[in-house]
Image (cartoon, coloured by chain):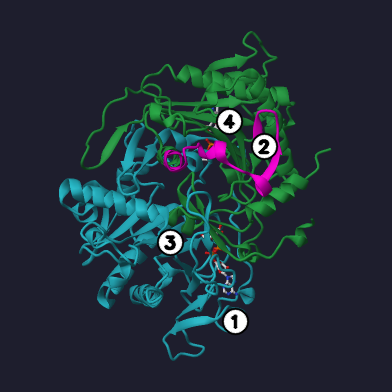
Chain colours: A cyan, B green
């Protein structure tokens, strides 16, 4: 079906059950004019200035490990410290300064960068499925190291691609921030999933019936557009088997995920003309409440940024999405990767 | 104290008690390099194409009212329907399609635009305090109309200034979206304030001791940088007297607020070189739980956008702010408006 055949739909407000918030679906919004000039598509500087490129390792903050471990100039992946960390590995974790009034703790934590290729112009989706899998396994390995630090409660893995998705460096990389607190959206997600489990006796993500929202599937994963997608053409990749933590993934599944992730990134890039996007791993805190285990299920989110957010989203936590998930899923299903 | 004298601070994680989330303060972040070219500062098109300008009223969606009411070409403020509404005033409000599985309601609601001046190049902060007050009173009037619609639970008033704060139109305006649901951040805020009240017997905003966070004050309002500011140089304006709803404001207070708001916008603009920003009115839902009244207190938030957000903020709901609120308040206090 061509894009022009997309059915005419009335605005709808859908509950995002996982994040416990509402999304406004309003196709009319996509026709808004703008009197600001088209956003520039900033071009990165010359690769010779990039500290993430092979040969520039000395310009980076200390390395944590590389893949393969014994490689020299021929490394494939490097996990390094972030030179401008949001949290500091050097601070002591101390208690709150106040429990009734204002509350602050020291900014203890780990902030790392995963350099996904030695070559400046290679994107994650350019790598063969096995190598995408190796990047995922490097992330798993680093999470397992961070787990040994008692004060760390949660690790957020995220990728910023493109300046409007927040990237300041264009060389393909992801970041990991290990925090001494459980972030609010993570707790909210745990609560929502627990609530669904209480009501139905099932895990929300195990129970999902994608139907017309399905994009594709592999041996161990399915990919779909969520029912109440926050962003237009948002994609989730969900493991078929129930599993609370991303770091439980094994090599076979990581390579299988690598293939499906690559395919989704390619479809998105082809359909939406290499948009800025975030790739997020939503996993569970380390010290899980054991009663959470049956309801928590990790997943990947790909969030393309086709339009910015404005004051409404910041104020309310409600998002406005001009594209109905059923339409986005159909369009992405139909993208042919040669 | 010059900017170079800003004390060296260690990273700190502060609890935003109102939004019940954490903010990472990390001064090191402000030194990050970027290999994306500087963000362009998009210039708006010629004013002759702008439907919000005087003489172009026929290019707009229907008018709701104007100020003064009996004016013709010499109007000062127009409140109009949004031509590309996120919600539709024409739909029936019907119940959820499902209560256990996925939930959707029809996208009923009102989406209006407040044109703050007939002249294209005039910003809100260019208006004299009395006229800023008149814009606030026009917003109050429209909220009171929307209150008569039984299905409407909450009205979000917001302003996007500058393309990176979401603005698609450069002519000075604000927007109002009236929703059949209470948005998640609004409920979360009510809950946090209620919790503080339970613990202390006081309203959080009545109880605030700004001290080194204070920027300025007027007869009826104070302005400060919040202890756990989400954005660098974020400003809150809080009424001194306890009041749950913005629309309870009277003319005298609106003009007094107009003066302080103008001053804060000018200081921000001068210090930060006319940054993109959002201005948000945080008020309470219409059908308040009476037990909420002692703990809910409306306020204004000015959120400058000096850096974008990335995957970390989207995934976790935690924000990273490179500027400590004490430093931001001191710098803003010291800005002299001639
Ligand atoms: N030589 C070097 N050695 C080691 N590390 C180096 C380095 N040079 C640069 N870096 C680090 O590399 C990282 C590159 O990260 P990204 O491009 O994904 O976005 P960044 O973290 O800058 O900010 C985006 O993501 C964050 C988190 O979502 C948002 O707060 C922010 O607004 C958004 O722009 C930076 O964090 C930087 O500190
Ligand atoms: N002739 C006309 N008559 C009446 N109305 C007209 C009109 N021409 C344009 N409009 C309306 O005027 C409004 C101008 O609003 P803004 O510039 O504040 O941002 P916009 O709503 O486009 O999107 C920003 O804010 C929203 C909400 O925060 C975000 O979803 C989005 O990503 C961000 O870009 C638009 O909503 C548009 O529909």
Q: Where residue B299 sits: x, y (%)?
A: 56, 34
User: Disc 1 to disc 4, how far (Cα)?
Assistant: 48 Å
Q: Quadrant of the N terminus of chain B?
A: bottom right
User: Disc 4 to disc 3, how far (Cα)?
Assistant: 36 Å
Residue with the mark numbered 2: B45
Residue with the mark numbered 1: A56
Mark 1 crowd level (few <14, some 14–19, many ≥20, 10 Å Cα): few
Residue with the mark numbered 3: A181
Q: Where residue B262 sits: x, y (%)?
A: 71, 33
As helix, strand or loop, the secondary structure at mark 1 comes to loop
Numbered disc in front, either 3 or 2 = 3
Q: Is residue A28 visible?
A: yes
Residue at image location 54% in from the left, 64% down from the top: A106
The residue at label 4 has a CB less than 8 Å from ligand 2: yes
**Hey, which residue is sitting farthest left in the picture?**
A201
Bounds of the magenta segment: B194-222
User: Disc 1 to disc 2, how far (Cα)?
Assistant: 44 Å
Chain identifier of the residue bearing label 2 in the image: B
As helix, strand or loop, the secondary structure at mark 4 comes to strand
The residue at label 2 has a CB less than 8 Å from ligand 2: no
Mark 3 crowd level (few <14, some 14–19, many ≥20, 10 Å Cα): some
Numbered disc in front, either 1 or 2 = 1
As helix, strand or loop, the secondary structure at mark 3 comes to loop
Residue B174 numbered mark, or none = 4
Mark 4 crowd level (few <14, some 14–19, many ≥20, 10 Å Cα): many
Numbered disc in front, either 1 or 4 = 4
As helix, strand or loop, the secondary structure at mark 2 comes to loop
Q: Do the numbered discs 3 and 2 sit on residues whose CB atoms are within 8 Å?
A: no
Numbered disc in front, either 4 or 3 = 3
Chain identifier of the residue bearing label 4 in the image: B
């Amino acid at each position: 079906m061509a894009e022009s055949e997309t059915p005419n739909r009335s605005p709808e407000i859908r509950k995002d059950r996982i994040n416990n918030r509402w999304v406004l679906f309003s196709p009319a919004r996509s026709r808004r004019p703008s009197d600001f000039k088209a956003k520039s598509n900033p071009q990165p500087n010359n690769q010779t200035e990039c500290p993430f490129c092979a040969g520039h390792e000395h310009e980076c903050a200390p390395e944590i490990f590389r893949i393969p471990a014994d490689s020299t100039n021929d490394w494939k992946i490097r996990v390094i410290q972030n030179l401008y960390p949001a949290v500091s590995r050097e601070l002591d974790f101390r208690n709150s300064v106040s429990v009734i009034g204002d509350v602050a703790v020291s900014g203890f934590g780990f902030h790392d960068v995963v350099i996904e290729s030695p070559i400046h112009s290679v994107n994650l989706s350019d790598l063969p499925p096995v190598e995408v899998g190796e990047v995922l396994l490097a992330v798993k390995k680093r999470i397992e190291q961070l787990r040994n630090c008692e004060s760390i409660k949660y690790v957020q893995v995220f990728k910023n691609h493109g300046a409007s998705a927040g990237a300041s460096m264009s060389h393909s990389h992801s970041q990991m921030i290990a925090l001494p607190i459980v972030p609010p959206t993570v707790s909210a997600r745990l609560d929502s999933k627990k609530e669904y489990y209480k009501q139905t006796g099932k895990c929300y993500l195990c129970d999902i019936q994608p139907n017309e929202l399905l994009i594709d599937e592999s041996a161990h994963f399915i990919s779909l557009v969520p029912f109440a997608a926050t962003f237009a053409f948002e994609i989730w990749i969900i493991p078929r088997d129930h599993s609370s933590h991303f770091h439980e993934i094994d090599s076979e599944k990581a390579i299988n995920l690598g293939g499906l992730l690559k395919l989704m990134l390619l479809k998105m890039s082809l359909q939406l003309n290499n948009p800025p996007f975030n790739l997020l791993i939503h996993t569970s805190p380390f010290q899980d409440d054991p009663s959470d285990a049956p309801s928590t299920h990790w997943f990947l989110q790909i969030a393309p940024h086709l339009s910015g957010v404005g004051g409404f989203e910041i104020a309310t936590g409600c998002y406005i999405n001009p594209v109905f998930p059923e339409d986005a899923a159909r369009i992405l299903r139909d993208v042919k990767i040669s």
